[in-house]
Image (spheres, rainbow, N blue to C red):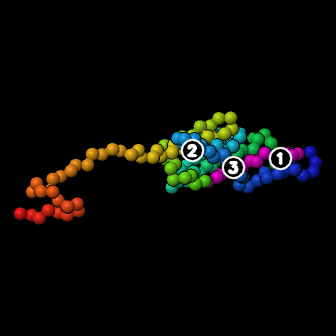
Amino acid sequence: MSGPSRAVGAAGEGYLPLDIYQTDKEWVIRAAVPGVDPNAVEATFDGGQITIKAEIKPPADARPEQFWLREIFAGKVSRQVTLPEDAVGEQARAQFANGLLILTVPKAQPAKPKSVKIPVEAGGNGQPTQLGTIPPKK
């Protein structure tokens, strides 16, 4: 092959495209990581932030000077996003399917109002007391 290769964004830190959406019960983060070994992906949740890191390896049988056209990024990619406060990162799950890393982060369920019986005490001497006053001690 003669002439320079036509490389487009083929070196350095790459961009990791994401989709983030919510359902009633969870946040879903989809990261496009085609060609990445699932064991080479790192996903963490810390202080409300999701961090995803991976490395896309170039073909093992091709040296840079052999490329005629190179548009598929090879190298490290990472992305960090902050999720809303209702995200419960300690219960996050991840799965890898068809070149997508899919993270699901449950939402904290709002506390349901609880009915509590409030005990009512007598005024002490059997006499009615005015609201907000304490009966005198004998």
Give the residue pinned by disc 3: 16
Q: Type of residue at label 1?
A: Arg
Q: How many marks?
A: 3
**Residue at the location (15% across, 53% down)?**
122
In front of the other: 23 or 70: 23
Q: Residue 56 location in percent, x, y?
A: 70, 45
Give the residue pinned by disc 1: 70
Between marks 2 and 3 in the image, the one whose residue lies nearer the viewer:
2
User: Which secondary structure lies at badge 1?
Assistant: strand
Q: Is residue 132 above or below residue 20?
A: below
Whether residue 89 appears in this view of the structure is: no
In front of the other: 39 or 98: 98
Mark 1 crowdedness (10 Å alpha carbons): few <14, some 14-19, many ≥20: some
Span of residues in magenta = 67-80
Q: Could you give the CA–CA distance between mark 1 and mark 2, rounded to whole angstroms?
A: 35 Å
Q: Type of residue at label 2?
A: Trp
Indicate which disc residue 15 carries.
none
Q: Is residue 69 left or right of residue 98?
A: right
Indicate which disc residue 27 carries.
2
User: Which secondary structure lies at badge 3?
Assistant: loop
Q: Earlier in the sequence, mark 2 or mark 3?
A: 3
Q: Is residue 34 above or below residue 119?
A: above
Q: Type of residue at label 3?
A: Leu
**Residue at the location (20% across, 64% down)?**
133
Q: Residue 125 location in percent, x, y?
A: 9, 57
Between marks 3 and 1 in the image, the one whose residue lies nearer the viewer:
3
Q: Residue furthest right?
A: 2
